[in-house]
Image (spheres, grey):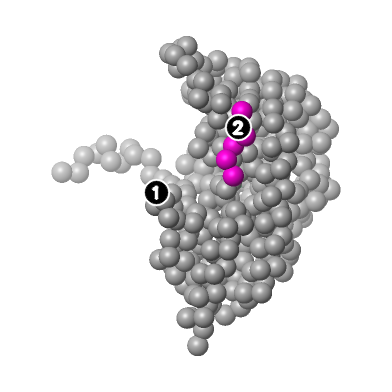
Amino acid sequence: MNGNWRDNIRRVAPYVPGEQTMSPRAVKLNTNENPYPPAPEVLQVIRESNDEGLRKYPDPDCRQLIHALADYHGVKPSQVFVGVGSDDVLAMAFMTFFCGSQPVLFPDISYAFYEVWAEMLRIPYRKQPLDDGFRLKKEDYFQKNGGIVFPNPNAPTGLLEPVSAIEEIVAANPESVVIIDEAYIDFGGESVLSLVDKYDNLLVTRTYSKSRSLAGMRIGYAIGQEELISSMLDVRNSYNSYTMNQTALAAGTAALADESYFRETLSKIIRTREDAKERMRKLGFSAPVGGESFSNFLFLAHESVPAGLIFQKLREREIFVRYFNKPRIDNYLRITIGTPEQMEILYDNLREILKETEV
Ligand SMILES: *Cc1c(COP(=O)(O)O)cnc(C)c1O
């Protein structure tokens, strides 16, 4: 029987995250997780989460975490919004700011979730093609629009745009909110947070998932001028007052306290990344002609072996990387930077795979 209720279902094509293998043997380089554990203080706080903390509702205003983030970034608490990973923060921002009739603009090669949210929320949008080197063309964003969003560094390319180019885009669009998704900015890029005081239409989003080793805890945040943040809070509080659980609030606060652990972890990853660029080049891989990665992953094509084949062969060996079977990028692999030991396993296996596939 086909009931009419089926006509009333919201039909959506969901975002598909990278495979979360449970195999203990796997070398997991496919979802840009941090290979190092969170700061010891974070683990301590999680262990100490007690009856009081769990029995009661968490603070709906997330004051502890918001104050810690405001202090950390030198902004006012009223300029900070927190959510369940930056995915939640970005979805709230889409709901709050992208309600006009003009299309929202984002790059054709970018974080795939933007298109999924636009579709689900019925927001008109237009994908602006990156140039042949996968660089953003800022002129593409100097036209009438209902909002702008892109990551910097971009994902999955890892390429970084200078603050000056982003400022031009923000300044050229006083009638739209411009969201800069800085999920990977800690890995060597220059943030546009310094522009927040100057532009009332700029929202910057960040996540604890990559640079702070807390993907499993789900913490993200946004910083912007007070009016942007209070509009997001109105939307959030019309939907769910308690998005952030007590343990996440405490862990997120504790993570900010240990700056030296954070810096040390970042510099290890950056060192491994720079070494990986060289090692992968020697294996016949190259980055887009537009530049090199400033993130915790590399985006690379091989000179002779198709990316889809390398992806499959690595997967058979329980080495997981990311492959997007999409126009323009279907010959690239996105490889998360792991520990030096994990990277050695990757190089060894790639060497074998390339040998057996080359004729
Ligand atoms: C990983 C990622 C996010 C989402 O991260 P959360 O785990 O939800 O905080 C957002 N944007 C980009 C570009 C990402 O790569």
Residue 333 visible in image: no
> What residue is at 62 percent from the left and 74 percent from the top?
283
Lateral position of residue 190 relative to residue 181, left or right? right
Q: Nearer the viewer, residue 327 or 33?
A: 33
Left or right: residue 257 versus residue 94 is right
Q: Please name which of the two marks, 2 or 1, marks the residue nearer to the observer.
A: 2
Asked if residue 265 can be seen in this view, the reply is yes
The residues bearing labels 2 and 1 have C-alpha atoms spaced at a distance of 24 Å
- Range drawn in magenta: 36-41
Q: Position of residue 93 (x, y in %)?
A: 60, 34
Q: Amino acid at mark 2?
A: Pro
Q: From this view, report whether residue 3 is shown above or below residue 247.
A: below
- For residue 283, side relative to residue 176 (left or right): left
Residue 44 rendering spot, x and y as whole percentages:
56, 26
* Ligand 1 is within 8 Å of the C-beta of the residue at disc 1: no
SS label for mark 2: helix
- Number of on-image labels: 2
Residue 51, label in figure: none
Check residue 22 in the rendering and tell me which mark sits there, or answer none: 1
The reply to whether discs 2 and 1 touch (Cβ–Cβ < 8 Å) is: no
Where is the N terminus found, in terms of image quarters? top left
Tell me what residue is drawn at x 49 percent, y 75 percent.
353
SS class, disc 1: loop
Label 2 CB sits under 8 Å from any ligand 1 atom: no
The residue labelled by disc 2 is: 40
For marks 2 and 1, the one nearer the N-term is 1
**Residue visible at 53% across and 34% down?**
218
Relative image position of residue 49 (x, y in whole percent): 50, 20
> Quick one: label 2, few (<14), some, or many (20+) residues within 10 Å?
few
Identify which amino acid the numbered label 1 is placed on.
Answer: Met
Which residue is nearer to you in this view: 232 or 83?
Answer: 83
